[in-house]
Amino acid sequence: MQTPNPYQFPPPQAPPQTAPQAPVKKRRSRAAIAGVGALTAVALAAAAAGAVVLFRRDGERPPAAPADPSKPIVAGWKTVVNPQHGTAFDVPPDWEVLAPTVFSGHVDDVDPDKVLIGHTAPALYKSRWCSIDGDGDGQVTDVRLANTGTKGAVGAKDAAEVAEKTAPTWVYAAYTQPDKSVVKWDKPKEYTTRTGVKGSYVTARSEGAAQPNRCAGDGRAVVFGFKNSRGDLVAWNFYGRTGVPGAVGDALIMRIMSTVRLAGEPKDPAPGP
């Protein structure tokens, strides 16, 4: 049986128990996006998709990383560089790449001052996929369809633990609060990117998330844990809505993850968010 992570999610075998979300007075967004150190709530949920394993033929050598990590590996794509963690990856040209100093994450529905999870240098897909006035106060919030970025993993023992703890947390924070019982996840799988970065990834999903508004519903997260050039454990994260038109597909998620690479020495002395 899979060991539950510190967020006390039920083991993957537990049957889903969908519970209606209790109304929260003047509840703000589930998602936060702001400059580092100054969080501002701006969205209710996020994006979409899952993952499949890509294999190389035995003996095939991975392509060399570009001399300039800010240059994309995939022709025509955009590169997302995170100087804080010394990492980079590519996204398709129709994705929106935000500044490395931007923090994007999710807060507790009951206590908006409590950040459940987040990452920096995010890239968004369809950042205005759905708009809603979540609490009826006339303030409209734009909900994105997909989100990806990189975060630190302080205290984790290895890449597999990074992925297994982080993926379910994204799904819970973005899609299922306050119900943890509908969050399911797979066991960690070893993975090597196109440039030879080795680690492990986990896919998590919700099954039967409550739908208190037209933007809410089930989602999925894929998290790849690995070490940067300083030896710090970090996590590349993708999460997004599932079961909706235009949801990001498995093949695209894996193609994006395959471009994860190291990008010089991390700038921050500590592997933070």
Image (spheres, helix red, strand yellow):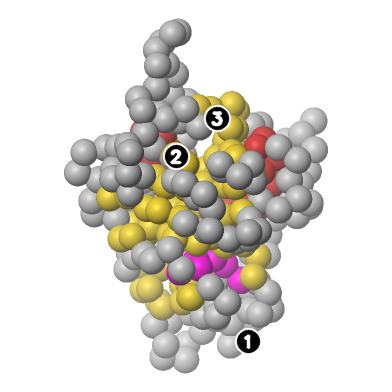
Whether residue 251 sits left or right of residue 51 in the image: it is: left
Query: Where is residue 86 drawn, in percent x and y?
Result: 50, 50
Earlier in the chain: of badge 3 and badge 2, it is: 3
> Which label lies toward us, 2 or 1?
2
Q: Are marks 2 and 1 in contact (CB under 8 Å)?
A: no
Q: Nearer the viewer, residue 32 or 177?
A: 32
Q: Which residue is mark 3?
A: 198
Measure the alpha-carbon separation of dots 3 and 2: 10 Å
Measure the alpha-carbon separation of dots 1 and 3: 45 Å
Q: Which residue is mark 1?
A: 25
Query: Where is residue 32 drawn, in percent x and y?
Result: 52, 72
Earlier in the chain: of badge 2 and badge 1, it is: 1
Total tally of numbered discs in the picture: 3
Answer few, some or many: residues within 10 Å of disc 2's Cα (few below 14, many 20 plus, some between 14 and 19): many
| Quadrant in which residue 3 is drawn | top right
Name the residue at the bottom extreme.
137
